[in-house]
Image: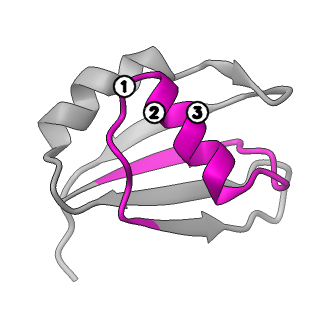
Amino acid sequence: MAELWIGNVDPDTTDEEIKEFLSTYGFPPFDDIQHIASEGSRPAVLLSFGEVGPETLRRLQPRVHNMFWKNRTITVQVLTERSE
């Protein structure tokens, strides 16, 4: 399982818009999405990919990191595995 963090996402962005945006740049469909509210002006989403490893996301990440999308520059990071 791998996770992808997308920061500075427009808060009005729908899950479907995120899915379409990422698929345009070759990302596989995500399994789960969690919207992370922000006290400031930079909300984020955390995407989980059950069948994709972090190395796959690391190859795709440069395609969208620091991209200007929906009037914001987004930051995209592949999260390391965490134990819960």
Task: Judge whether 72 appears above or below 28 on screen.
Answer: above
Counting other residues with Cα less than 10 Å from the Cα at mark 1, is it few (<14), some (14-19), or many (20 or more)?
few
User: Is label 3 in contact with label 2 (beta carbons under 8 Å)?
Assistant: yes
Looking at the rendered structure, the secondary structure element under dot 2 is: helix
Q: Toward which corner of the image does residue 82 lie, by quadrant?
A: bottom left
Can you identify the residue that label 2 sits on?
A: 23
Name the residue located 39 percent from the left edge and 17 percent from the top edge.
Answer: 62
Name the residue located 45 percent from the left edge and 33 percent from the top edge.
Answer: 23
Task: Judge whether 7 appears above or below 83 on screen.
Answer: above
Counting other residues with Cα less than 10 Å from the Cα at mark 2, is it few (<14), some (14-19), or many (20 or more)?
few
- Amino acid residing under circle 2: Ser
Name the residue located 48 percent from the left edge and 59 percent from the top edge.
Answer: 46
The outermost residue toward the bottom is 84
Counting other residues with Cα less than 10 Å from the Cα at mark 3, is it few (<14), some (14-19), or many (20 or more)?
some
Question: Residue 21 got which mark?
Answer: 3
Q: Is residue 49 left or right of residue 72?
A: left
Quadrant of the image containing the N terminus = bottom left
Q: Which residues are magenta?
A: 3-32
Residue 50 drawn at (x, y percent): 21, 62
Q: Toward which corner of the image does residue 34 lie, by quadrant?
A: bottom right
User: How many marks do you count on the picture?
Assistant: 3
Looking at the rendered structure, the secondary structure element under dot 1 is: loop
Q: Marks 3/1: CA distance?
A: 9 Å
- Amino acid residing under circle 1: Gly
Residue 74 drawn at (x, y percent): 65, 31
Q: Marks 3/2: CA distance?
A: 6 Å
Question: Residue 26 got which mark?
Answer: 1
User: Is label 2 in contact with label 1 (beta carbons under 8 Å)?
Assistant: yes
Task: Judge whether 21 appears above or below 16 on screen.
Answer: above
- Amino acid residing under circle 3: Phe
Residue 49 drawn at (x, y percent): 28, 57
Name the residue located 77 percent from the left edge and 50 percent from the top edge.
Answer: 13
